[in-house]
Image (cartoon, grey):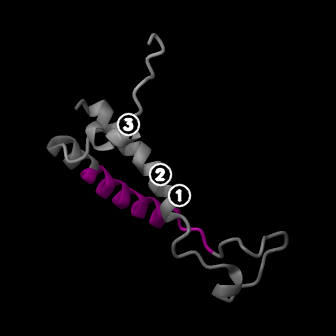
Amino acid sequence: MRWTTILAIYFLLWFISLFLVLPFGVKTAEEAGKDLVPGQAESAPAEFRPLRIFGTTSLVAAALFGLFYANYVNGWIDASTFKFLYTPPVDLSK
């Protein structure tokens, strides 16, 4: 596998992981005991910690990529695993 392919797959997994990680540990202003800023939605987070989010996302994406690469090398799951999804084309010449 080329390094560019590895990089592309890692970043795809990174962005998927970002949306998995974003909701964890979020507290609203009410839950954190802070006052709302005028115009702030009640459901908005009280604090935004981008470095914590990016770090956690990177760790989750690295773990997912590790699983992906181990599967790539060892061939645990391949296309033949999903044969039940394939329906052969109907021969209309008969």
The numbered disc on residue 16 is: 2
Q: Which residues are drawn in magenta?
A: 47-67
Q: Which amino acid, mark 2?
A: Ile
Position of 45 compared to 2: left or right?
A: right
Q: Residues within 10 Å of mark 3 (few under 14, many from 20)?
A: few
Q: Provide the secondary structure element on which disc 2 rests.
A: helix
**Which comes before the other along the chain, label 1 or label 3?**
3
**Which comes before the other along the chain, label 3 or label 2?**
3
Q: Provide the secondary structure element on which disc 1 rests.
A: helix
Q: Residues within 10 Å of mark 2 (few under 14, many from 20)?
A: some
Q: Which residue is mark 1?
A: 19
Q: What secondary structure prevails in the magenta region?
A: helix
Q: Which amino acid, mark 3?
A: Ala
Q: Which amino acid, mark 1?
A: Phe
- The residue under the point 46% across, 67% down is 52
Q: Give x and y (percent) for residue 5.
A: 31, 32
